[in-house]
Image (tube, helix red, strand yellow):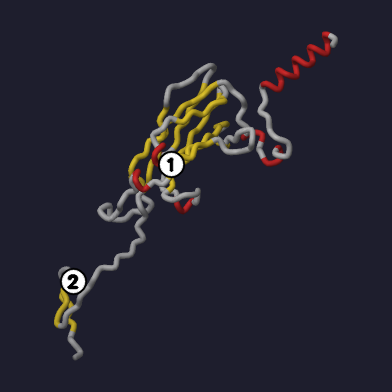
Amino acid sequence: MTATRLGMAALGLVTLAGCVYVPLGTLSKVPTEALATAGNLAVTVKPQLAAGGYTVQAPDPSIVEPYKPTDVNHVVVQLYKVSNGAEVALVDAKGLPKLYDLAPASFSAPLTFSGLSPNTTYRFKAFAFKATGLSEADKISVDAGSSLEVALTNDQTPGVRTVPVQLMDKPFDGRVSPALDIASGSLTIEDEDILWEDPR
């Protein structure tokens, strides 16, 4: 093999080393900006559940019951890339989202996301669900209070970072059905007397 061919082969190897392999047939399904490039940095995060404090509506605070960590069936921590104020969910070489889906026994386990690139901002978003699956109706965490943003620089590997998982308050439907026993004669409601005659 000539020196020219050897040089071209070496250049090809260097080029491939900086790319992510995507199986044939998946390119049309995976946005280019969503591919997680093969960087050499890693970030370890740890979810931390916080009981409800965000109210879906505005009922009497004495009636609201916040969701508690014991109400959570599983937690998903997903990785996003932030660029120009917009976020894109990252996927691996197989086109699968880069995430961890945690059962209750693993809620406090450290999670390592590797293959990250320097000079890039990443966002780790946590979602808590009260039942199996990923139905929006079963999500009991608040997006605004359940994320962590990390800006990586050259050759920087930060220590373990905490991703808050802020649970919401259980919604109040505004309906109350008290037991009411009306006797013949008069019925008193607060400071007003309403006279009700027994028709019998």
Tell me what residue is drawn at x 78 percent, y 12 percent: 7
The amino acid at mark 1 is Ala
* Spot occupied by residue 95 in the image (x, y as percentages of width and height): 63, 37
Residue placed under numbered mark 1 in the picture? 103
- The quarter of the picture where residue 37 lies is top right
Side of 191 where 58 appears, left or right:
right
Q: Sequence order check: which comes first, mark 2 or mark 1?
A: 1
- The quarter of the picture where residue 148 lies is top left
Task: Tell me if residue 105 can be seen.
Answer: yes
* Spot occupied by residue 133 in the image (x, y as percentages of width and height): 49, 49
- The one nearer the camera, 131 or 78, is 131
- Residue 35 to residue 65: above or below: above
- The quarter of the picture where residue 102 lies is top left
Side of 42 where 12 appears, left or right:
right
Residue placed under numbered mark 2 in the picture? 189
- Residue 48 to residue 184: above or below: above
Q: Are marks 2 and 1 in contact (CB under 8 Å)?
A: no
Side of 88 where 1 appears, left or right:
right
Task: Tell me if residue 143 can be seen.
Answer: no
The amino acid at mark 2 is Ile
